[in-house]
Image (cartoon, rainbow, N blue to C red):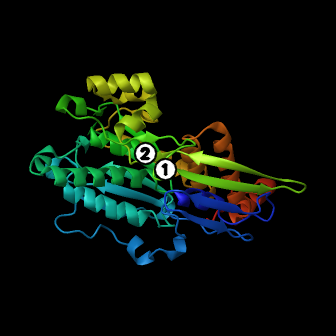
Amino acid sequence: MATLLRRLAGRRCSSGPWNGVILRDTHSRTSALVPRGGSPPLLAGDGRPLTACCRAHSRGQHTQAAGPVEVDVKRLEGEDKGIVEVLLCRHKKKNALGYVFVSQMKNLVSTLSCDSAALVVVFRSLVPGVFCAGADLKERAGMNHAESDLFVHGLRSLMTQIASLPMPTIAAMDGVALGGGLELAMACDLRTAAYTAQMGLIETTRGLLPGAGKTMRGHKTHKKKDLAKYRVCMYGERRSSCETLTLRWFCPAGGTQRLPRTVGIALAKELIFTGRRVGGQTALEIGLVNRAVEQNQSGDAAYAEALSLAREILPQAPIAVRLAKEAVNRGIEVDISAAMAIERLCYARVISTRDRREGMAAFLEKRPPRYTGE
C-alpha cells in the first residue's frame, strides 16, 4: 500500500505547492521520503519506472508457459499503433478459467503493466459466441481444498492485476460472460457488448458466491495489517499544514465488490441473489457496459465497437490518461477530502510533462497535438 501515494506523488513539480511527501505504511513499518525536483518517469502498474522494465519481454507475441497457448497478444500497427489486444483462445473449454489459462493471463498482464508502448488494451475472445464461460468447474472438482484455495487466490490476484494496469482497458463481449468471465470484464475500465451477449454472476446457482474479497476501513484502533496510513505534508508560501489520508485496505475482490460499484448496490444484490443473466441491451441500460451494438454476421460487433472506442482514446496524452485513471480509481474508494488530495497529487504529476506543454502549444497554434508520452 505504501506504493500508492509514492506512485501518485512522484517527484515535486517545480510549479506546484508540494514540497515533499512522507509515506508511512503501518503494514510494513516502512517509510520513504519522495525527493524534490524534476519530473518522475511514467510508472508501470507495479510502481516501477517503465524504463526499468524489460523491453524484450514486452515484444513477446504470446506468454511463455507450458502447454498450448490459451491467451495470446496482438499489437496493432499503423494508425492503430499503441492498441494491444489480449486474445482469449481456449477454444475447447470456451475460455474457462483453468490453471493454464489463468497462469498465461497473469504472465501476459504482468508484461503489459510495464509496457510504455501499450496505450490501450482490448480484451477479446477468439472463441465464437463466448467471451469467457467462467470457472473451469471440472478442473476445480479435481482439486483438494488446499489446491482450490490456492487457485482461487491466484484468480482473484489476476483480476486485481487487470484492474491495476496503468493504461485504459476495454473488454469486448461478443458472447457469453458468466461468473468469473464477467468479473474479468468488470476488472476492465470499459466494456462493450453485442445485444446477443449474455452476462451474469451465476455463482449462487452453483452454491458459491462471486469472488470472496473484502474491504476493511481503517479506524483509530486497528491491527497493522488492516490498513495502510499515509501522511501527506503540504507546504505553502506562508504556512504549512499536514493532512492524514487513511485509505481502505483491500483483499483482492471479485464480483461482490465490483458489481455494486458498477450498477449500484440494490441492483447488484438482485442480480447476485437470483443469478440472473442479462443481454447486451439490458446491460447497457443498467450501466454494466458502456456501449452495446447489434451483432454482425462475423460475430465480432462488440470487438469492432471496442476498437472504435480505443481509437478515440489513442490520440490523447498518455500520461494524462494514466493519471486520470489513477485519480478516479483511487479517489472513488475514499472520502471526498482524501479523494481531492489524490487528485491534487495526480495533477501535480502532469504539470511538468512535455505533453502538457505540447497540448497548450497545439491549442494556441490551432493544430492537432503530437503527444510523446513524456
As measured in the structure, the alpha-carbon distance from the residue carrying label 2 to the one carrying label 1 is 6 Å
Q: Amino acid at mark 1?
A: Ala
Q: Mark 2, residues whose alpha carbon is within 10 Å: few (<14), some, or many (≥20)?
A: many
Extreme residue toward the right, this view: 238
The residue beneath circle 2 is: 306
Can you say whether 348 is above or below 116 in the image? Answer: above
Q: Residue at image x 26%, y 49%?
A: 152
Circle 2 SS class? helix
Answer whether labels 2 and 1 touch (C-beta < 8 Å): yes
Looking at the image, which is closer to me, 230 or 112? 230
The amino acid on which the numbered mark 2 sits, given as a three-letter code, is Ala
Q: Residue at x 69, y 70 (%)?
A: 35
Q: Position of residue 69 (x, y in %)?
A: 22, 63
> Does any portion of residue 374 appear in the rendered image?
no
Taking the spot 32% from the left edge, 41% from the top edge, the residue there is 212
Residue 110: name its quadrant.
bottom left
Horizontal and vertical percent for residue 12? Answer: 73, 65
Q: Note whether 56 is above or below 75 in the view shown.
A: below
Q: Residue furthest front?
A: 221
- The residue under the point 59% across, 59% down is 24
Q: Where does label 1 land, which residue? A: 310
Residue 250 location in percent, x, y?
44, 47
The image quarter containing residue 34 is bottom right
